[in-house]
């Protein structure tokens, strides 16, 4: 079965989604693909669950790859980036 193909007897997801490895970027990608599948199904609650799963996958990635960095550190940088784009400046 090719990636993205419709599953014959689907569970939550109607597309084939490869399983990622916990603590690796492949798990984050799995959650993104599940989010897209939820959107394709117009399942807003499922999409929110997938966003939550994505946060968990990011936390585990940080624990594995960057143990001294917390998700709060990423949020601080995200807010700074939003500010820069809102103000149209990078410097």
Image: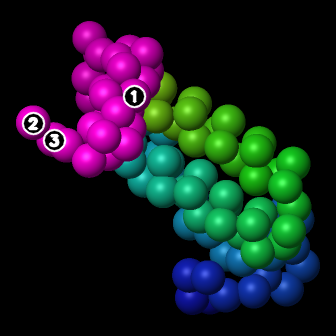
Label 1 or label 2, whichever lies nearer to me, is 2
- Coordinates of residue 71 in the picture (x, y in percent): 43, 21
The image quarter containing residue 64 is top left
C-alpha distance separating marks 1 and 2: 15 Å
* Left or right, residue 70 beside residue 29: left
C-alpha distance separating marks 3 and 1: 13 Å
When the figure is inspected, residue 59 is found, relative to residue 88, above or below; the finding is above
The residue positioned farthest toward the top in the image shown: 68
Q: Which residues are magenta?
A: 62-91
Q: Which residue is mark 3?
A: 90
- Secondary structure under badge 3? loop
Q: Quadrant of the N terminus?
A: bottom right
C-alpha distance separating marks 2 and 3: 4 Å
When the figure is inspected, residue 3 is found, relative to residue 27, above or below; the finding is below
For disc 1, the neighbor class at 10 Å (few under 14, some 14 to 19, many from 20) is few
Sequence-wise, which precedes: disc 1 or disc 2? 1
Q: Which residue is mark 1?
A: 79
When the figure is inspected, residue 55 is found, relative to residue 71, above or below; the finding is below
- Coordinates of residue 52 in the picture (x, y in percent): 67, 36
Q: Which residue is mark 2?
A: 91
- Secondary structure under badge 2? loop
**What secondary structure is the stretch in magenta mostly built from?**
helix
């Amino acid at each position: 079965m090719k990636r993205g193909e419709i599953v014959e007897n689907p569970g939550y997801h109607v597309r084939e989604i490869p399983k990622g490895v916990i603590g690796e970027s492949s798990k984050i990608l799995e959650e993104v693909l599940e989010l897209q599948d939820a959107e394709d199904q117009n399942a807003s609650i499922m999409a929110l669950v997938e966003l939550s799963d994505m946060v968990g996958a990011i936390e585990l990635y940080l624990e594995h790859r960057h143990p001294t960095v917390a998700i709060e550190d990423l949020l601080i940088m995200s807010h700074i980036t939003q500010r820069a784009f809102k103000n149209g400046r990078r410097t």
